[in-house]
Amino acid sequence: QPQLVESGGGVVKPGGSLRLSCTTSGFTLDHYLITWFRQAPGKEREGVSCISGLVRSTNYVDSVKGRFTISRDNAKNTVYLEMNSLKPEDTAVYYCAAKFMISTVQSPCVIRRPDHMDYWGKGTLVTVSP
């Protein structure tokens, strides 16, 4: 059974940094698109960043471009989200999700809607506060 477990959340001051990890098991990471989502209180879940399987193309929502970096370590079955220059509006529960997709397309991956993803983790809370 595929599993995703997020970790690395916490409380940080504005301008600070955090690195989130999404540790996966039960499936081949190269065959899946991994996407980080976040959900702030009272708001809809939004896609933040994606990384594709074979070619590892990436993409970001405009609000995090230049501040967040997504990466993968297949040897550790882990996807990371490095978050820098954090802002109070980044406060949310962050989820990683997987969608089965074998693709060799080099163009940036598409950040899918939440209901298009196949498997989810339970989330990790990020709080950005003075």
Image (tube, rainbow, N blue to C red):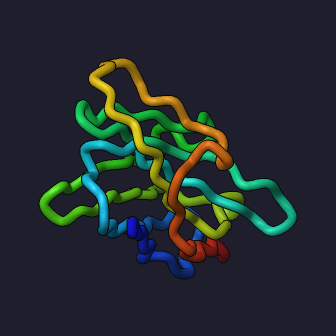
Rendered residue at 56%/74% (across/down): 122
36 shown above or below 22: above
63 shown above or below 90: above
Q: Quadrant of residue 63?
A: top right
Which quarter of the rendered picture does the C terminus lie within? bottom right
26 shown above or below 59: below
Instruction: Name the spot of residue 88 as percent of width and height, x first.
Output: 68, 64
Rendered residue at 63%/75% (across/down): 127
Instruction: Name the spot of residue 31 as percent of width and height, x first.
Output: 30, 43
54 shown above or below 127: above
Instruction: Name the spot of residue 128 as percent of width and height, x first.
Output: 62, 71
Rendered residue at 50%/76% (across/down): 9
Instruction: Please say whether residue 19 is visible from this viewpoint.
Output: no
Rendered residue at 42%/74% (across/down): 5
Which quarter of the rendered picture does the N terminus lie within? bottom left
Instruction: Name the spot of residue 107 as percent of width and height, x first.
Output: 37, 19
Left or right: residue 73 versus residue 56 is left
